[in-house]
């Protein structure tokens, strides 16, 4: 969270160390208008409120995509705001729900991150196969906003790993095939590429059905590294691999050893996540309804043409 201070000779507390341009962006993120000189245009009480609430909590997702990840979007926003990774890699992007959320936060918080999404965009035995237009549809949502700092790498995870130097990645999201063997291979292959500030997140840590095995690897890794696990939306494990993590991340991990604090963190992000999930379901329902209506319209026209043909 950005700390605010009564400084700079301005009427209202300002985030420390931000340029006027960044301040304006900060104001846009938290929904507070700024005047042209960058001053916060609000009452004296309002800015103090933001000392206790991360700006990331007020970001509205720009894109809603088919996914079982959407309820983790508020945490993705917070993680980018807190970690400010120099380099981010996602293994497993599918239709892009998680990746587009990470990119949106990088843009909002001007983190200067280089971001990479790795996927064959062919699908896998657990997620199912992907239609050939999934990649192009993602491109359309991605390129206009994020191509400046983000790249979609259409290849296998093992192939992509060869393109990154050791010690260069601050944030790695592992969300490919979720068998124990696959996810362990992903972690071990990419481990040398991780930096001193590195955090690795794993989706599906709570799934124990079929051949899902992330929960087994998570149990092993948390013997060696500090971490925090969310239980909602199939589980999300947040692992601190680097030895030089920012304070906000260390505070999150500290909550693990205090059950009440951990429950409150989980409840908070679960609640924020439910709002995103609900909107996603509404949008999908609306889309399904629109498709149905246009299908019915097409069928009605075809029927009318058949009837007209018979009448001739
Ligand atoms: C569970 S989905 C990713 C979900 C996504 N993160 C989201 O927000 O909805 C898994 C993706 O990983 C990809 N995948 C699995 N194994 C892979 C591999 N070894 N190399 C490249 N892509 C892979 C699949 O094509 C699929 O799109």
Image (tube, grey):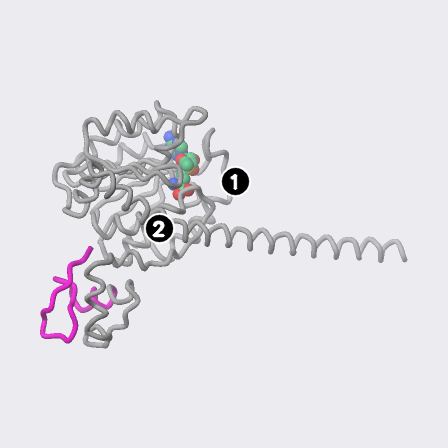
* Residue 239 appears left or right of 204: left
Is the residue 49 above or below the residue 94 in the image?
Answer: below
**Residue with the mark numbered 1:** 131
| Depicted 206 relative to depicted 269: above or below | above
257 or 33: nearer the viewer: 257
Q: Which of 245 and 117 is in front in this view?
A: 245
For the N terminus, give its image quadrant: bottom left
Q: How crowded is mark 2: few (under 14 residues within 10 Å), some or many (20 or more)?
A: many
In this rendering, is residue 248 above or below 15? above
| Magenta stretch, main secondary structure class | loop
Position of residue 293 measured from the top left corner of the image (x, y, whole percent)? 65, 56
Magenta-span inclusion, residue 23: yes
Question: Can residue 44 be seen here?
Answer: yes
Q: Is mark 1 on a helix, strand or loop?
A: loop
Q: Position of residue 263 (x, y in %)?
A: 29, 42
Residue denoted by label 2: 101
- Which residues, given as a range, are shown in magenta? 1-25
């Amino acid at each position: 969270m950005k700390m605010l201070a009564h400084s700079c000779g301005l009427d209202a507390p300002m985030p420390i160390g931000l340029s006027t341009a960044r301040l304006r962006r900060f104001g846009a993120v938290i929904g507070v208008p700024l005047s042209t000189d960058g001053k916060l245009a609000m009452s004296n009480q309002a800015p103090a409120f933001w000392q206790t609430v991360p700006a990331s909590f007020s970001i509205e997702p720009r894109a809603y995509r088919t996914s079982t990840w959407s309820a983790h979007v508020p945490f993705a926003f917070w993680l980018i705001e807190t970690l400010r990774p120099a380099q981010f890699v996602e293994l497993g992007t599918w239709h892009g729900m998680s990746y587009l959320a990470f990119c949106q936060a990088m843009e909002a918080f001007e983190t200067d991150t280089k971001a990479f999404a790795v996927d064959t965009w062919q699908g896998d035995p657990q997620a199912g196969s992907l239609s050939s237009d999934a990649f192009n549809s993602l491109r359309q949502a991605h390129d206009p906003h994020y191509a400046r700092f983000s790249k979609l790498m259409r290849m296998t995870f093992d192939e992509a790993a060869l393109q990154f130097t050791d010690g260069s990645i601050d944030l790695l999201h592992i969300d490919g095939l979720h068998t124990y063997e696959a996810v362990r291979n992903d972690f071990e292959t990419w481990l040398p590429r991780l930096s001193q500030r590195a955090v690795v997140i794993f989706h599906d840590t709570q799934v124990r059905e079929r051949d899902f095995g992330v929960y087994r690897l998570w149990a092993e890794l948390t013997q060696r590294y500090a971490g925090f696990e969310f239980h909602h939306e199939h589980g999300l494990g947040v692992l601190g691999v680097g030895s030089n993590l920012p304070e906000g991340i260390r505070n999150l991990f500290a909550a693990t050893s205090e059950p009440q604090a951990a429950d409150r963190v989980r409840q908070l992000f679960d609640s924020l996540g439910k709002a995103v999930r609900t909107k996603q379901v509404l949008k999908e329902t609306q889309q399904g309804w629109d498709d149905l209506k246009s299908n019915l319209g097409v069928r009605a026209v075809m029927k009318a043409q058949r009837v007209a043909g018979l009448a001739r």
